[in-house]
Image (cartoon, rainbow, N blue to C red):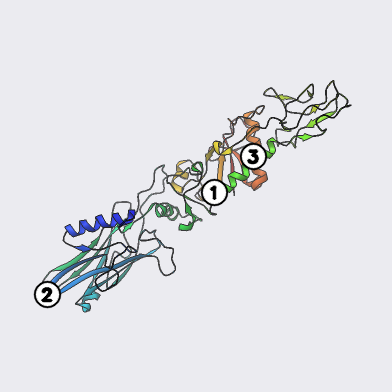
Amino acid sequence: MSRTRTGWRAWFACMAMVLAGCTCSKRPGEEGTGGSGEPAPLGQDSVQREGKEIVLEVLDLTVGGEGAEASGTSFVTGESITARGRVRNAEELEPRIQWSLQPVGAHTGPAAPASKEGAEAVFKASSRVGTRGNREPNPPLEYELVASLPLEGGETLEVRLPPTTFLHQEEDDVLRQEYLDFGTRFQPGRALISIPGRPVLNTGNYTVIAETEAGGLSRLLDQMDERVRALLQNDVQEKPVGTRGLTPTTVVVSPGAPILTVGALGDTDPQGDDVCSGPLVGGRCAGSILAGPNGIADTRANNRETKVKLEDFVSSAFRNPQRNRAAGSATINSRHNRGSALDIDPRRMPIPGKTPQQLMCIVEAAGDAVVGERDSFTERGATLFLACDSPAADHVHVQR
């Protein structure tokens, strides 16, 4: 019979409990039942009294209330953690079951309440993880659940559920916990946590990211790619190739719409004896192209056909709150935290005839078209806003 990774963890933990003198069964949701056909308890301890076996059982352990997102027994603060137990062959003792949720590690805060009596106990976790910023994953919050039953004569039955198998945050919830610790406006549910299809979109501390809209970062990058290509192929064919009888000064190809602070860029090299009438940038024509001495339109517009893949120039995308603070951002509600922002550094983009400043302005102009001017801007670092043609600029920030 095959087991899941979680199943094996539960099995090994169960064996440890057996060696310690307790019996146990499987994690919630695994196969197996007790002798009566009902699910087997998570753990139990027993004693013989007056010819009968008194058994303390931990029946189940759940996170969240009715209608909550499925989470197994991983959790975040604010979610209820409910434990249920019973006493077989002595049901009258069930109100005396004593529960405690004991934090493991200095980063895990005390449970509320710390202890409770009865057949059922409801707790909530707390966090002592700091918010100073770091570039490593946070440690998971984890608790050991202890159920005990004091008996007459000083004997006590006890069941311990180890945190590594039961109340231990999985990676999705470690990430979600950061948002709770920081008090951000965006509080992602489990449905908004995913592994991105493009690794470059994850510049956080985990293998998973959070997005306000699932797949939103990938769509934003695709739209930026499309718009940058359009700007690099926007020269206009004024005269069809092969047109004859033109004056030498007739414009065959004109540059596309000008880019803010830079002007028209030009994306075409003169062909035949056609002549560039505009300035040269990086040795390439950046203006209109004329018919030249033979009076024939020899030049096809946008003949450079440079391939652009912005994915290669993404310097930052999703950042979890701790990583965002470590990067120098003072904004706890950054769009990077929400998985809705890209930083693109195009300065080394291999496009002939374009300076680094022009490339920066092209990407900013593409962002203006995709998300609007208020959400597309040029920066240095996390806090210095600059004109796109500033030599000090190191990326364009585009956000939704």
The secondary element bearing badge 1 is classed as loop
Q: In the depicted view, which residue is nearer to us: 233 or 318? A: 233
Q: Secondary structure at mark 3?
A: helix
Q: Is residue 194 left or right of residue 7?
A: right
Q: Is residue 108 visible?
A: no
Mark nearer the N terminus (2 vs 3): 2
Question: Which residue has dot 1 on it?
Answer: 335
Q: Earlier in the sequence, mark 1 or mark 3?
A: 1
User: For this view, does 337 lie left or right of residue 352?
Assistant: left
Q: Nearer the viewer, residue 8 or 321?
A: 8
For disc 2, the marked residue is 49
Which of pointers 2 and 3 indicates the residue nearer the eye?
Answer: 2
Circle 3: is it few (<14), some (14-19), or many (20+) Cα within 10 Å? many
Answer yes or no: is residue 223 visible.
yes
Q: Taking 365 as reference, is 20 above or below it? A: below
> Viewed as shown, does residue 190 lie left or right of 377?
left
Please state, as top left, top right, bottom left or bottom right, where the N terminus lies in the image.
bottom left
Q: Which residue is mark 3?
A: 364
The numbered mark, 1 or 2, whose residue comes first in the sequence reads 2
Left or right position of 17 against 220 = left
